[in-house]
Image: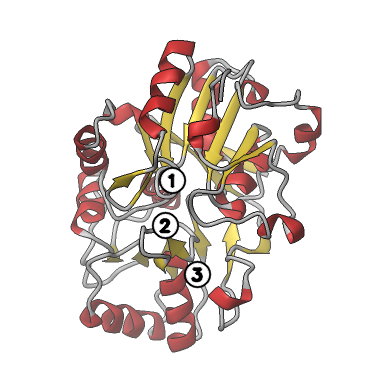
Amino acid sequence: METSVQFGHWKGIEETGHRRVDVGDDREQRNSASLVESMVPVQDNRASVGDLMALDKTLAGIKAIFLDLDGTIYLGDTLIEGSLDFLGRLEEAGIKRYFLSNNSSRSVKQYVAKLHGMGIPAAAEDVLLSTHDLLAWLDGEGVTETYLVGTDGMKEMLEEAGVSTDSADPQYVVLGYDTEITYEKLSRASVLMHRGVPLVVSHPDMVCPSPDGGLPDTGAYMALFEATTGVSAAHVTGKPNAGMILHKVEELGLEPGQCAMVGDRLYTDIEMADRAGVHGVLVLSGEATREDLVAATQNPSLVVGSVAELCCRSC
């Protein structure tokens, strides 16, 4: 059972029922320790996925598209070849596009600045982050006192929303993708968890794609804390939570079948597409490989090498 939670322009999902699921990458070589099990939203429109019309590379029939960033539009600070042309084709086709990322290391302002620096026009309302989903959940739970393991950019977003990030008596330890991690942060968070303070995590991603290979992401930090303290996350926000897409689909007055999620991860991007009942387009420019599809439980509508192949009648 679910109820909506409004947080500014962000409509999250407040859960009154949960199920235990494995939220990690299912490849054993990336998880020598057991994957962390976490409470995740039960919202699931998966039954409607089979009713979707077939999708091809032209994206015919799509009115809005949600684009992952890391591994989909860029790798680190390098644009994936063809991504700018792809975005231009979306604009010419009149397809609304939104950038949707689990990477909580940057604030919305920082993402907009990065996109502008890469030649991609974007406004704050075009950027949807796992941090928004986290804030909606914290608001729904009445949480205002936390200890944050996260970057200054994430700290800025939480504190602007009225959430303390360095409380002497935190209700939760909040874990984000902290690219400024220190041993002091790890130690203090571990002590708090030993004392019974629960952990909430912005997103489950194990690996952040980069031009030089995968880098430790929040799921890896989560596994570290479980190994250190024996404490599993009480809740994990971000993709694959279907609410991250469905609030915008509803706002646009569209049906899920008129929308697509494009990303490089099966267990977040395509899993969320399945749950939301939108088309899932898997790109092989980031984490996932064709070999991963063999054992995958997710059902992408389309698999392409990169976004360069999309919305293009002559590609």
The amino acid pointed to by label 3 is Ala
- As measured in the structure, the alpha-carbon distance from the residue carrying label 2 to the one carrying label 3 is 10 Å
Q: Is residue 40 left or right of residue 155?
A: right
Find disc 1 in the rendering and name its residue: 133
Q: Looking at the rendered structure, which numbered label has been put on residue 202?
A: 2
- Name the element at disc 1: helix
- Percent from the top left, x then y, of residue 110? 21, 43
Quarter of the N terminus within the rendering: top right
126 or 145: nearer the viewer = 126
Residue 83 sits in quarter: top left
Badge 2 or badge 1: first in the primary sequence: 1
- Name the element at disc 3: loop
Quarter of the C terminus within the rendering: top right
The amino acid pointed to by label 2 is Ser
Q: Is residue 267 above or below residue 255?
A: below
Other-residue count near label 2 (Cα within 10 Å), few / some / many at <14 / 14–19 / ≥20: many
Residue 220 sits in quarter: bottom left
111 or 286: nearer the viewer = 286
Mark whose residue sits in front, 2 or 3: 2
- Percent from the top left, x then y, of residue 88? 38, 20
237 or 312: nearer the viewer = 312
Tell me what residue is drawn at x 30 percent, y 47 percent. 78
Tell me what residue is drawn at x 36 percent, y 49 percent. 131
**Can residue 4 be seen at all in this image of the molecule?**
no
Badge 2 or badge 3: first in the primary sequence: 2
Find disc 3 in the rendering and name its residue: 233
Residue 19 sits in quarter: bottom right
The amino acid pointed to by label 1 is Asp
